[in-house]
Image (cartoon, helix red, strand yellow):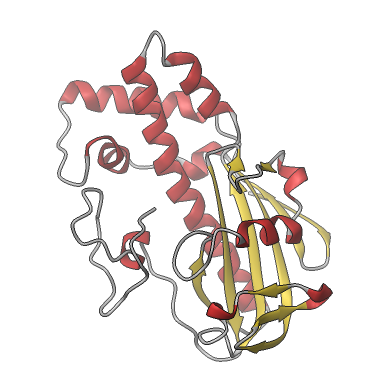
Amino acid sequence: MVADHDIQNRFLFSFTPQDCRPRVEDVACYLGGADYRPTSGILRRIEKALDLAEGLMAPAAALAVLPVLKADRDGVRLSGGRCLPGSLAGEWGQAAYVTACIATLGPGLEERCRAMSPSEPFGAIVLDAVGVAGLDKLGEIVGRETENQARIRGLYGGARVSPGLQQADLSLQALLFELVDFEALGMELTADLIMKPFKSISEIRALGTRPLAAATPHKCMDCDLPACGFRRSAPRSGHTIGNEHH
């Protein structure tokens, strides 16, 4: 991993494709669901796709650490007149900082999937599943870096919130793109608030002077769809966030 601390509290990170190489079983889950048991032939196809993906992915992230000026029912107020939704203020009332992050695997993998689709449709599906599982790995890396930013400030890191999920409206996506150096990643945000490249993630987290709601080890624990065919972890006790799974 290489970090470029270009200005205080704004960082760019690049990672190796090996950092984001998922496990075979995680790719298989995205192919056929949590109960899917691939044949030896499919396992070989997955391994081949994993090797191919390493030459296509260019994982990178842009992170900003921003001081919280005030949190009340009107929102979480940041410097520069920016404000996060009021729905976050209750849990984040003790937040000293907020981290904003967008990260991407780059365009190479999805471009290869499109090119393969007409002649190798199943190969494209397997490669796409590698990309989805690779995003999970990228999210874990981003989480560790966020925790590191909390530790060096003597603070506690909280759970992640992603635009369009949990209590955050998709409109939060536009604010995240204002806060971080997305152009350095070669990313863009469409009028419909969709990130390009598509194999990308975005999130915000609170850093507090006291322990906050802890980040979960797996995203399924933050999802309240118990019947989801892709679920690999039980949800947190009493956890309710709506009807979305990512």
Closer-to-camera residue (130/1) = 130
Q: Please indicate whether residue 190 sits to the left or right of residue 199 in the image.
A: right
Q: Residue at x 52, y 63 (%)?
A: 143
* Residue 239 quadrant: bottom left
Residue pushed farthest top? 119
Residue 5's place in the image compared with 114, above or below, is below
Closer-to-camera residue (19/179) = 179
Residue 57's place in the image compared with 190, above or below, is above
Q: Residue at x 77, y 62 (%)?
A: 10
Q: Please indicate whether residue 72 sits to the left or right of residue 233 in the image.
A: right
* Residue 99 quadrant: bottom right
Picture coordinates of residue 12 (x, y %)?
Answer: 72, 53
Picture coordinates of residue 76 (x, y %)?
Answer: 65, 81
Q: Residue at x 55, y 33 (%)?
A: 57
Picture coordinates of residue 186 (x, y %)?
Answer: 72, 38
Q: Residue at x 20, y 62 (%)?
A: 226
